[in-house]
Image (spheres, helix red, strand yellow):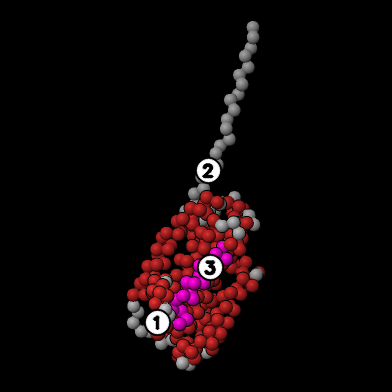
Amino acid sequence: MTTTLATPATTAPPLPAARTVGLRDTVAQSLTMAHRGLIKVKHNPEQLFDVVVQPIIFTVMFTYIFGGAIAGDIASYLPIIIPGILVQTVITASIVTGTQLREDMDKGVFDRFTSLPIARIAPLAGALLSDMVRYAIASTITFAMGYAMGFRPGGGILGVVAAVLLVMVCAFAISWIFALMGVLMSKASSVQGISMLVLFPLTFMSNAFVPADTMPGWMQTFVSLNPVSHIVTAVRELLSGGPVGIDLVWALVGAAVIVAVFAPITMRAYMRNA
């Protein structure tokens, strides 16, 4: 009589449960990641060099070099240059979003985040939110320099607040473009170099520093289509307290379009690499 031994069936290990994080937890985790970004600035204050030093240098240099030639005197040039410096400084500061994101991904920081029970989008959203503090610092220093040099906005404090909010909203929208570059490119230096090549002509070939009517005809056409020109014009109108025209609408619509297009693309690329 033979005995047949039954071989126990091998069972596959259970699959890990899908990560599901509610909206409330996602917001809280994104704010925590934003706080992490602020702590990094605290321990590396040189990261604020661009938003602290750049508006001071550019305001003083451009005002005293171009003020007399363009507006006749310094006081008349300040209402032109302060909005231009504000827009240029804050938009340029949004490049840091992409470069720091690329550096964190190169160091493997985001690989460690993927092992945590948090929303995968939280590190990316936190990085963008923490940069809002940089924009606020740049705006404060720009207006402080302008006030010290004699600039008095006709729109008062409400006009200043509205102008700052507009610039911060536009910079936040543009930061999604640089975040996408940070996810797709292989080096932080590449992100910074290409970003500057894009922003340099957009900021200087605009009405930020000189009136467009002094430029050649073909350049006036570019300036009139340049989104930076619409932002600068809207900021000037808000600061002056005068009637606000269509440029404010174009600036807000442009920001909304950028977020609607680039935010999903950036998140999809980030989730694929996370």
In front here: 141 or 2?
141
Q: Nearer the viewer, mark 3 or mark 2?
A: 3
In the current view of this chain or complex, which residue is farthest to the top? 1
Kindly state the secondary structure of the residue where label 1 is placed: helix
Query: Real-space Cα distance between discs 3 and 2?
Result: 45 Å
Which comes before the other along the chain, label 3 or label 2? 2
Furthest-right residue in this view: 43
Please state the horizontal and vertical placement of residue 160, each as a whole percent of the image.
44, 81
Q: Position of residue 147 (x, y in %)?
A: 51, 87
* Place of residue 114 in the rendered image (x, y in percent of width and height, measured from the top left): 58, 51
Q: Residue at x 40, y 85 (%)?
A: 240
Q: Earlier in the sequence, mark 3 or mark 1?
A: 3
Stretch of the chain drawn in magenta: 191-210
Disc 3 marks which residue?
A: 197
**Residue underneath mark 2:** 17
Q: Residues within 10 Å of mark 3 (few under 14, many from 20)?
A: few
Marks 2 and 1: in contact by CB < 8 Å? no
Q: Main secondary structure of the magenta part?
A: helix
Q: Amino acid at mark 3?
A: Leu
Mark 2: amino acid? Ala
Q: Identify the image quadrant of the N terminus.
A: top right
Q: For mark 1, what is the residue?
A: 213
The amino acid type of the residue labelled 1 equals Asp
